[in-house]
Amino acid sequence: MELYEKTDCIFPHWNDFPDVGLYMDQVVELVNKYLSGFPAFSGDDKQITSSMINNYVKSKAVPAPEKKRYSRVHLAYIMIICTLKQTFSLSVIQSLISGKTNDEIRIIYESFAAHQQAAYSKAAEDILSAYKNSENKHDIILDLVTDVNIRKNIAEMLSKEN
C-alpha cells in the first residue's frame, strides 16, 4: 500500500513543456519524468520507450517530428496517449485526438491535464481513505473494478460518436 500513499501526483501543464524542439532521447526522459509520480508508471518495466513513440508516429497517432525534433504539441499527444493507453486501444484514443490543429491540441491537452489532475487527487484521497478504514477491502476493490469497466465501456461507445 505504500506505493499508493502519494495522492499529490502532478500532471504537467502545457507551459511546463519546453518551448524548444527536443530529440527523441530527451522526449523519452522528459515523459518518463512527468509520469514517474503516477503508480501506473513507476518501475523500470513501465517506462515509455523510443520504440513506443516511434510506433505512435508510424500509426499516425502522433504527428511526425520536424527535423527529428519534437515540440510541445508532440509532448501533449504523447502524454495523452501514454495516459489513456492504460485503458483504451490506440484506435479509440486516435478517434479523440487525431486530425486536430496545434491550437486544438493545446486546448484538449490543457483540459485533459486539469481533469486528470483533479480526478487523480480526488479519487486517490477518497478511495484510499475508504480502503484504509474498511474491514472488507475485497468489496472496495470489486466496486472499483466494476466501476472502471462500466465507465470504460461507456467512454468507448461515446468515442464512436465523435
Image (cartoon, rainbow, N blue to C red):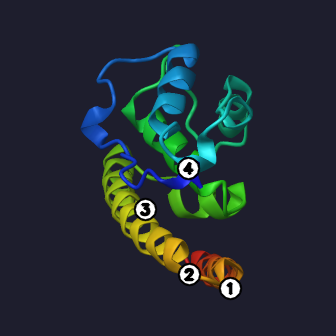
The amino acid at mark 1 is: Asp
**Tag 1 and tag 2, C-beta contact below 8 Å:** yes
Q: Distance between the residues labelled 2 and 4?
A: 17 Å
Task: Tell me the residue at 45%/53% (across/down).
Answer: 100
In the displayed structure, 130 sits above or below 6; it is: below
State the mark number for residue 139. Answer: 1
The amino acid at mark 4 is: Glu
Q: Name the residue under label 4.
A: 2
State the mark number for residue 134. Answer: 2
**Tag 2 and tag 4, C-beta contact below 8 Å:** no
Task: Tell me the residue at 33%/48% (across/down).
Answer: 106
The amino acid at mark 2 is: Ser
Q: Where is residue 154 in the image (x, y as percent from the top left)?
A: 62, 84
Total marks placed: 4
The N terminus lies in quadrant: bottom right
Q: Name the residue under label 3.
A: 120
Q: Distance between the residues labelled 1 and 4?
A: 20 Å
The secondary structure type at the circle numbered 4 is helix
N-terminal of the pair, mark 1 or mark 2, is: 2
Q: Position of residue 75 (x, y in %)?
A: 46, 35
N-terminal of the pair, mark 3 or mark 2, is: 3
State the mark number for residue 20. Answer: none
Q: Which of 6 and 96 is in front in this view?
A: 6
N-terminal of the pair, mark 3 or mark 1, is: 3
Q: Where is residue 88 in the image (x, y as percent from the top left)?
A: 68, 63
**Mark 2 packing: few (<14 Cα in 10 Å), some, or many (20+)?**
few
In the displayed structure, 132 sits above or below 26; it is: below
The amino acid at mark 3 is: Tyr
Q: Distance between the residues labelled 3 and 2?
A: 21 Å
N-terminal of the pair, mark 2 or mark 4, is: 4
Q: Distance between the residues labelled 1 and 2?
A: 9 Å
**Tag 3 and tag 2, C-beta contact below 8 Å:** no
